[in-house]
Amino acid sequence: MWTNASDYFGNNARLSKWYLDLGFGKLRQPVDHYDWRDLSGVAVVNAYYHQLKNLVVMPAGILQGVFFHKDRPNYLNYGSIAYVSGHEIIHGFDDGGRQYDQKGNLRNWWDASTDTLYKQKADCFISQYANFTVKEVGQHLNGINTQGENIADNGGVIQSYRAYQNYVRKNGVELPLPALNLSPDQLFWVSSAVQYCSKATDQYLALQVMTDSHSPSRQRVNGVVSNSEDFSRLFNCPLGAPMNPVDNENWSQTL
């Protein structure tokens, strides 16, 4: 494809044609799971699961900031970047991703009994999150619309915590952070929540509740930790406390 520094419109037209030809050229060809031209730019601070390629995409841009640093304690990295990667892997088994097989084909590959059990567990999440209220706007979450992200959040954090426990068994207990009266395991959970620190207007929250597949940050964090027996144990949450509810029928402990 050729470009002309003085022809902005023409450059865009040629680029659009090139990209369209690239897409049509892949018809009936084997899927190349490592072709980054279909995926996000490497500098993007994001991660996602690609259903049609059965692929987790984690661009280099996310390997920084609150998500990762090679020189900081691993309980912080496992609570952030490992949580993100676990979240994206679980998307392969959420309400949308589970409908695709290992080759990215849309088909039902679940046997009847497993499918029924999955739906029962997913209904627990739908009911739980539908009972959450965003107090700023007086609205309940849509448990159906957010179930995929909620499942990925709960499954991702429990798997990343298990991975960190495995790291500790192999490498020993890490030192805690100075000036904080928190254990390394507690700091894992703090790290898992820090990435969702945010400030939102009431108008934004109302729009998010109506349209977003993600739960708002407060409910996203509290929903996950209230489903974790590990969190309740580490932070001494008594049975019946908001973060350790009595009637909690959660799915994350079955993973």
Image (tube, rainbow, N blue to C red):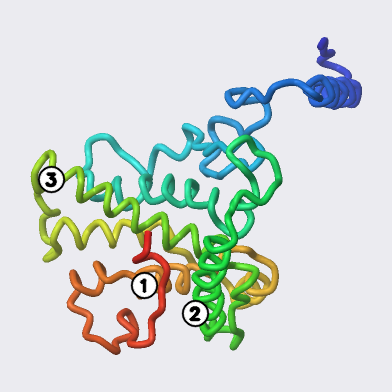
Kind of element beneath mark 3? helix
- Please state which of residues 152 and 74 is positioned toward the viewer in this rendering: 152
C-alpha distance separating marks 1 and 3? 24 Å
Q: Residues within 10 Å of mark 3 (few under 14, many from 20)?
A: few
**Three-letter amino acid code of the residue under disc 1:** Asn
**Three-letter amino acid code of the residue under disc 2:** Gln
The x, y position of residue 133, in whole percent, is: 53, 84
**Which one is earlier in the sequence, the residue at label 1 or at label 2?**
2
Residue at screen point 21% across, 85% down:
238
In the displayed structure, would residue 64 be above or below residue 190?
above
**Three-letter amino acid code of the residue under disc 3:** Arg
Residue 117 visible in this rendered orientation of the protein: yes
The residue that mark 3 highlights is 169
Quarter of the image with the N terminus is top right
Residue at screen point 36% across, 46% down:
82
**Which one is earlier in the sequence, the residue at label 3 or at label 2?**
2
- Please state which of residues 33 and 225 is positioned toward the viewer in this rendering: 33
C-alpha distance separating marks 1 and 2? 10 Å
The residue that mark 1 highlights is 227
Residue 154 in which image quadrant: bottom left
The residue that mark 2 highlights is 128
